[in-house]
Amino acid sequence: MKKLTLLTAALLTVLTSAAVAETMNASQGLDKIKNNLENSKANQKEYDRNLNVVNQNINEVNKAKSTVLKQKEAVSTEIVKNNESLKKVMVQERDISTLLNQEKEKLAAEQKQVEQLEKMMAQIKQNQQQRETNIADYQNQLKMTTDEKKAWKDREAELRGQEAKTIQSVRALASEESTWNNKKKGYEGESKRWASEADKQQKIHDTYQGLAEQNK
């Protein structure tokens, strides 16, 4: 903006012209008035020039003000948009915080589950070790029972062989017994027959012996 130029001397002349006119003669007064007129015109030109500068400055200020108002309106619009975006971001932040807290809670719960599962895994592994020990023991016992079963089967085969021999012996003895029983029956029959014959002959003998003794 341009600065205003003030003619201090001319202003003083105008202010004191009335007082000076009383002491001056007509010629001097006319010269003074002429001088005052010229000064007034000069001052008018100066003030017109300054007024033009002021008007130009006012126009520039108005233009600048219009530009600034447009900028202010644009900034206000941007502020509204910014606030809307800020609200959206704040809502997103709240939602994300909620999701974050939910995930943390889930993570903590899952961590507890992991710890429980790890304890279960440790217990299961311990159980598996015990079962492996049991399996080895049962396998040894099974081998022992298998060996024992084989021994009993071998013993059974041996006993079966002995049984077969005893059956053969029993059959042989039964056959021999039958043979001897048959012989016994034959001998008993013959013994009875000859015993009867012996009794008969004894009776005959006794009879004849008695007769012989009677005839003596």
Image: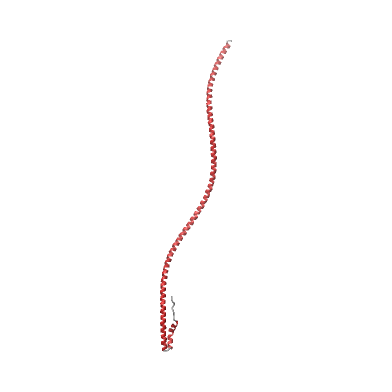
Residue 79 position in % (x across, y down): 43, 66
Front residue of 5/12: it is 5
Q: Is residue 72 left or right of residue 164?
A: left
* Left or right, 21 with reference to 163: left
The quarter of the picture where the C terminus appears is: top right
Position of residue 18 measured from the top left corner of the image (x, y, whole percent): 42, 86
Near-viewer residue (30 or 188) = 30
Q: Quadrant of residue 17?
A: bottom left
Front residue of this view, candidates 202 and 17 = 17
Picture layout, residue 150 above or below residue 123: above
Locate residue 38, reporting x and y percent.
Answer: 41, 83
Comparing 209 with 93, the one in front is 93
Q: How many labels does the image show?
A: 0
Give the quadrant of residue 5: bottom left
Q: In which quarter of the image is the N terminus?
A: bottom left
Residue that extends furthest to the right in the rendered view of this protein: 216
Q: Position of residue 177 (x, y in %)?
A: 53, 26
Residue at the top extreme, as displayed: 216
